[in-house]
Each structure stands twice: as structure tokens, then as C-alpha cells.
Amino acid sequence: MSTKQPTIIYTLTDEAPLLATSSFLSIIRAFAGPAGINIATSDISVAARILGEFPEFLTEDQRVTDNLAELGKLTLLPDTNIIKLPNISASVHQLVAAIKELQGKGYKIPDFPEDPKTEAEKAVRKRYAKCLGSAVNPVLREGNSDRRAPKAVKDFAKKNPHSMGAWSMASRTHVAHMTHGDFYHGEKSMTLDRPRDVKMELVTKSGEKIVLKPKVSLLEGEIIDSMFMSKKALLEFYEEQMEDARKTGVMFSLHVKATMMKVSHPIVFGHAVRIFYKEAFEKHGQLFAELGVNVNNGLVNLYDKLQGLPNSQREEIIRDLHACHEHRPELAMVDSAKGISNLHAPNDVIVDASMPAMIRIGGKMWGADGRPKDTKAVIPESTFARIYQEIINFCKTNGNFDPRTMGTVPNVGLMAQQAEEYGSHDKTFEISEDGVANIVDLATGEVLLSQNVETGDIWRMCQVKDAPIRDWVKLAVTRARNSGMPAVFWLDPYRPHEHELIQKVVKYVKEHDTTGLKLEIMSQVRAMRYTLERVVRGLDTISVTGNILRDYLTDLFPILELGTSAKMLSIVPLMAGGGMYETGAGGSAPKHVKQLVEENHLRWDSLGEFLALAVSFEDLGLKTGNQKAKVLAKTLDTATGKLLDNNKNPSPKTGELDNRGSQFYLAMYWAQELAAQTDDKELQRQFAPLARTLTENEKTIAAELSAVQGQPVDIGGYYMPDFEKLEAVMRPSPTFNAALASMKG
Ligand SMILES: NC(=O)C1=CN([C@@H]2O[C@H](COP(=O)(O)OP(=O)(O)OC[C@H]3O[C@@H](n4cnc5c(N)ncnc54)[C@H](OP(=O)(O)O)[C@@H]3O)[C@@H](O)[C@H]2O)C=CC1
Ligand SMILES: O=C(O)CCC(=O)C(=O)O
Ligand SMILES: [Mg+2]
């Protein structure tokens, strides 16, 4: 057993989860302290990551360490225990806003060079790129993913069903994806026969060799893929789909994952904006180029750049942009009241959350008039888009799902070590010239995979190492065994990558005793159909998927089953032996911050944190032999069950119980459980007074927490709030604060 004080590392992130953390930390510490468990924090917010990247621009006392890199190293150690909350995966627009806020606070970091020209600017741009998009999760996810709805949560949802919209057979909502020229179309894949170092190179028509990636070191047994998206095919596809939507009078919406696919999807997004506003871009293209407009960062980038123009010129351009709408379909809106459309910013509509939200409400998105309408959901890449059409077909035929009776679909996802597409951004390139894109063995010159590409095509290489695949298969078998549910590997034998994967699944499944288990391999569309047929009958089915479907399905099913993916248990058993506990499967809910600042009500549900904390304590107890940690875990689980039974989740409505109230009730139930248990007499004695104080003062504390609501508050910043102000806002009950403080002694 380690002599070090057992430690749980709790991440400090952004937006709503950070707000919730500023009050929850004091609760966790009050409970963990008596068990001798240290709660350390690690600030991996986008603000901290920016500051960590530019120490030489900061004064001595402004400097912060590169926490993300440190935390990444810890995931490779066996006794690591991390609770990871969702963080912002920043768009350029968000990054620029964060930089401005930090500069305004006296941090003299450089501006973000959007269009770098000099070598110095290019170097700064490269460093900022490390803070863009999904920059945190891939570093920490040194394990595969186990996401599921715990029984208590599923039972709660059955008893307290959330609202679901009605699906009509006459709904015109559908998915549009490319049928040729997309990544699926010409994919090539291979399994490495031995370790090799390779380069990625473009051989142009004139015979010039342009090295795009000088070296990628590959291990024996690793699967690599080469795939590209044709720019020509993508532009034709957009034109066709926009025209089809216009003619048939259905709304147009675009769903991408510009956060995780941070190189390819902004490009895919930018093309949609340029096609939609084609005439305006033809007319003003030269000026836009001079202004450095880059709509890969959304229409917002164009509007920002127009700010510097004389009024008359700006107005003419805006008129020309508006004129484009006359012969284009209606656009789905992100914020109808403010006129913010689906093409405003690539990160406003993120496919994993946006498609389930649409399906949940009966296949609608919001129009410019604020009304829900049928939509053409454009998901250019066909590889996984087809699963959404399948579920839409199902809903049109069978109506929407019923949370009271539907089965559950947990997921075992292949994620470790930057698996598959989600790890490909450093190997993704926009092709500068027609030619042949090759992956070449550096030692032998052998061309391993080759693609004919054209200017503007997006070419990428994906990797997945053998050890994560083997671990993923083991996790799937273990989950199937422990849950008694059938497990379906969603793998398409016609897709070269998955064909390779299937060979390994077949091989590694044999390493386990699978007697009595139902394990199947099905292509995605069939797997979806099979799973849904079971779901409506109240039957449970584990989905075992690659990295993208892990992401998509762990929002899709929880949103349908539980109303939100925030209520998921999300475990990452680290391959080195440690554990990372993600809180839910959703993101950082930006609009919750707005509500807090304007009305002092935080609707964020910390259930994901409560669930993660319990498994974190349990794991720590098992690994360090700390019996008190096990008692904390058991009592916390019971307290969470009680919280659900008594309906003490936060309400979205200002004036009703919010996140702070919900956290208080958790603390009260938890203290009561600890005071009632007899497994650990010392803890029982230590928590009895707290249980008494909280129980006796329940009404006072609830009143103190609710009295503050309804007024605007100042938290001293968005990306880097002032922690003292934040604490004052998030911990407004003197009675509760005093009770927690009494646990320190
Ligand atoms: N693990 C991670 O680090 C992840 C990070 N992200 C990042 O989060 C940001 C926002 O992503 P987005 O796609 O909008 O998805 P979100 O999951 O943040 O938000 C979608 C909606 O889900 C609901 N929701 C999510 N979590 C909670 C919660 N704990 N309590 C109550 N409601 C919740 C809210 O709905 P309602 O309106 O009903 O309140 C919210 O508006 C992006 O920067 C994205 O990159 C996204 C996914 C995972
Ligand atoms: O890292 C991100 O940007 C989002 C992660 C995500 O959506 C997920 O893992 O479910
Ligand atoms: Mg997700």
C-alpha cells in the first residue's frame, strides 16, 4: 500500500461545470477530509491552458504550470485518480474572446494571429493552436470508455419521464449525407506487420514531393487508414442539398463536430457558408481575402471583419449577404431572437448533442420565427450519418420513444491513445495541388497507402494501436458479463478500417470466457435497427463502438432515455491501472452561465459529478485499502439515490431549486447516511453533528439559497472568473458554509 496520502484530482474547467465546482469543492473536502483523502485540483480551463502556453509573456506571479501536460503524465501511473469535468473545446472565436479577457486582466499575452504572415506570428499561431478545439480530452483519455446510466438514474427517469416531442409519419425531417467523394468512399486501411516509421507526402502532378508529415512512428499491429474528402464532391453536395431544401420548403441545418475534428470540420463548415452565400462571396471575394475573412470560423468571422469598414461599404455587403437568403432555404437557428443561424459559428451546433436534441423533440429545429420546423439535417460524412437516418425512420414509423418503458443502451467505446478519427488532426491536410497522397515507409521507401487527390481535398491518416483494441474487447466482454446484456460491436465489414478491426475483435474475444454471453458484430445501420427494436420492448443492449460512435451514441441514448447525457456514469479505466471518472457525457452548457449571471440561477445538474465521485472513492478504496473511502462511496451512492427519489435535482426555472440547492441536499443526505452507517464508527461519530446541523437547518439553508435568486450577479469574468466573487455567488448560505467549515477541525 502506498504511504502517500491518497489523492483524488478534481479538474477545474469552464462555464457551468466550473460554476458548480466552486461550491461543490467545499462539500467534497468536508467529506473526504475525515477519511484522510486529499482533494487536489488541476486547472485545465481554456484560460489556464492559454497562460500555461505563454509563460515568457507573464510576470513571475502570473505564471501557471502546464497543468494539462502534468495531468497527462499522471494518467500513465497506476495510482492516478482523476475526476474530469467537461471543458470548452474552443473555436477560434472563443479563443480570441478568452485572450481578450485575459489581456484585459493584465496578462500581456500576444494577440491571436488569425492570418499569420511573419515567422514570429506563425510560431504564436502554432502555440495557440494547442488550445483550440478538443485539446484536453485526447491528452487525458489513456483508456477506453465505459458510459452507462446507473440503475438508480434509469429508474428515476422511468418514474419521472422528461418531455418528448411527437414524431409524425408525415415529418419531412431527414439526414442528407454524401454518397460519393467523402471519407467513407475511398478509404484504405491496413494492419502493420511490424513497427515502422512513415511519412505523409504529396507527390504533385509535376512530380514535386511535398512532405506534409515527416514522421509518424507506428507499432506492430497498429491499424492505419488513409482517406480523403473531395472538395469538388462536397461543394456539389451542398449545392444540391441547399437547392433541394429550398424547392421542397424544408429548413437546412448543418451538423458537424468542429471541436474534436478540429482541422477537417471547420473546412467542411466553411465550404457550406461560402456555398450558401455564393453570390456575395463572388462579388466581394477579393475584399474578403484582403480583410483576412475565414468563414471556416463561421459567419461570425465575416461580421467581425466587416467592423473595420466604412458604414456604407459594410451595409452594402450585409445587404448582399441578406439577398442570398432569397434563393436559399430557411436556415435552422441557434438563437432566433438574436438572428444567430446554424452557420454563425462551427461550434454552436455540435452533432453529438444537436441531433439527439432534434430527435427528442420530434425531428424539429428552430426557424427564424422561433417556431419548431422540419429540417434537412446535413451531415456530409456518410460513415456515421446513416445511423441518424435509421433512428429517424424508426421514429417516423413507431412514434417517439417512451422514457417510462424504453430499454437502456450503455456504450463501450474504443477511445484510448487518440484512437481513430478523433486523433487524426495532426495528420489531416488540405491538399494544395492535384497529385497522389502517399503514406510511405521511411526506411524502405515502400508506399503503404496511396490516394489520388485534388486541390482542396481533405486528406487524413487515422491510427489505432493494438493494445487499446485488445483492452476495448476485454472491457466489452467484462461489461457484457457484469450486466447480463447482449453486446453488439457496431462494425461495418464493408468499411476497410472496420474490416481490419473485426479481425482483431474476433481474435481478442477468444482470450476470454464468453460462455453464456451474447456478443455480435453488426454494421452500424443494422446495429441501430436491432438496438432500437429492443429499446422499444424495454430491453437493454450494450453498444460497443469506435471513437466517433462512442461520442454520438453516448449523447443520443442518454438524451432520449434520461433527458440529458449529464446523468451518465462515465468511466475511463486507464490502461496503466489508474482511473479517470468523467462527469456525464455532455459538455459545459454555455447558456447556463448566462442564466446565472442574469438571474442568479444555475440550472446545471451535478448528478454526473455525484456519480463520478462515488466511483472515484470506491476505486481509491479498493486500490489503497482505505476502508473509509469505501464507506464514503457507498453512502454517497445511497445519498444520490435519495436525492433522486426526493426530486432534489435542479430546476431550469429561476426561483426554484438550483444547482446549489441540489448540492446542499446531497450533502445533507450524505451526512445522514454516514451518521447512520455502522461500518466505520469513527466516520459515524465525525458526521453525526454535521448530519444534525444540516437536518435541523434544512429550511434555513434552503431559504438562504433561494433568497439570492432573481438578480444579476458579477462573477468577474467568463473564461477566467474571479474565484472569490464566484465563491461568494455560489456559496450564499452562511448557515451551510459554517456547517461545512466545522468539518475542518
Ligand atoms: N467532456 C467534455 O469535455 C465535453 C466538452 N464539450 C464542450 O462543451 C461545450 C458545449 O457543448 P454542447 O454541444 O453545447 O453540449 P452541452 O452538453 O454542453 O449542452 C447541450 C445541452 O445539454 C444540457 N446539459 C448538458 N449538461 C448538463 C447538465 N450537467 N445539467 C443540465 N443540463 C445539461 C443543457 O440543456 P438545457 O438547455 O436543457 O439546460 C445544454 O444546453 C463545447 O465547448 C464543447 O466542445 C462537449 C461535450 C463533452
Ligand atoms: O472533447 C470534446 O470536445 C468533446 C468530447 C465529447 O463530446 C465526448 O467525449 O462525448
Ligand atoms: Mg460527446
Image (cartoon, helix red, strand yellow):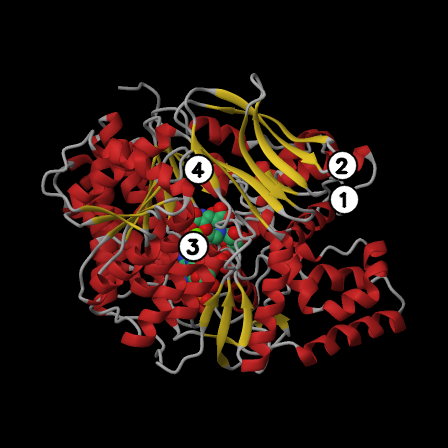
Q: Label 2 amino acid? A: Lys
Q: Earlier in the sequence, mark 3 or mark 2?
A: 2
Is 14 in front, or is 393?
393
Mark number displayed over residue 384: 3
CA gap between label 2 and label 1 equals: 8 Å
Q: Earlier in the sequence, mark 1 or mark 3?
A: 1
The residue identified by callout 1 is: 113
Name which quarter of the figure residue 234 lies in. Answer: bottom right
Q: Label 3 amino acid? A: Phe
The residue identified by callout 4 is: 419
Q: Label 1 amino acid? A: Pro
In contact (CB < 8 Å): disc 1 and disc 3: no
Residue at 34% of width from left, 58% of height from top? 525
CA gap between label 4 and label 2 equals: 28 Å
Specify few, some or many for label 3: CA neighbours under 10 Å numbering under 14, 14-19, or 20 or more. some
Q: Earlier in the sequence, mark 1 or mark 4?
A: 1
- The image quadrant where one finds the C terminus is top left
Q: Secondary structure at mark 2?
A: helix
Q: Earlier in the sequence, mark 4 or mark 3?
A: 3
Q: Earlier in the sequence, mark 2 or mark 1?
A: 1
CA gap between label 1 and label 4 equals: 30 Å
